[in-house]
Amino acid sequence: MTVKSKESIPEEYSQAVNELLSKYQGTTLGSLIPILQKTQDIIGYLPKDAMIRIADTLNTSLSKVYGVATFYSQFHIKPRGKNIIRVCQGTACHVLGADKVMSGFEKYLNTTPGETTEDGKFTLESVACIGACALAPVIIINENSHGKMSADKIDKILDSYKNKSADSLGDTTHGIGDVVSEAQNN
Ligand code: FES
């Protein structure tokens, strides 16, 4: 079995990356952020080989590309899971037990914030206040928010994400806009 390095461009995305970079060949550093965004859109993150290719395309150094990719939180230099779990660590959520919620996820997923589970299904992250403090503690999984969260709900919520797409989830989830307006009405 061939084990692919996380630093390589996955074969299935290689042609799309080639096409993208050929459009930017010979352009200046001003193109760096759009190229990083589009490359990440294709691959899902920015492997080292992609950053080397981008540096060559823009005739700049890998350290310059790496510096920008690691400066902005929108960019990810490690593979991310199919589902992104964000646990709010804002003040209201913190006061109402966000730490216990985060610890619960860490234990359940056997991972730590910023990391992805071995099976690639979940990435755990912490975020600042998402503006739904009345429903604290709040988490977001992909585009769906779950308010009044507690560690003992993790099991049931994550089970529903293991085998279904986010779009097919039922009434345990809300779009982030719903949660914010619900919070504002309380
Ligand atoms: S502090 Fe968590 S939603 Fe505001």
Image: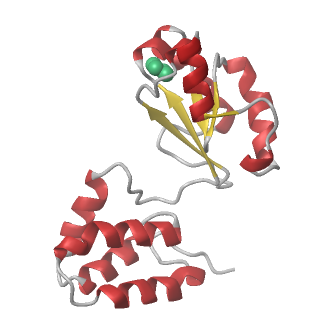
Residue 112 seen in the figure = yes
Between 180 and 77, the residue placed more toward the observer is 180
Decide if residue 31 is on the left or right side of residue 176. Answer: left
Does residue 144 sit above or below 117 in this rendering?
Answer: above
Does residue 158 sit above or below 39 in this rendering?
Answer: above
Between 173 and 77, the residue placed more toward the observer is 173
Residue 136 seen in the figure = no
Does residue 35 sit above or below 69 in this rendering?
Answer: below
Residue plotted at (52% across, 21% down): 132
Residue plotted at (78% across, 46% down): 162
Q: Quadrant of the N terminus?
A: bottom right
Residue 31 image point, x, y percent: 25, 74
Residue plotted at (44% across, 33% down): 127
Residue 93 image point, x, y percent: 50, 16
Residue 163 image point, x, y percent: 82, 49
Instruction: Tell me where residue 109 sits by quadrant.
Output: top right
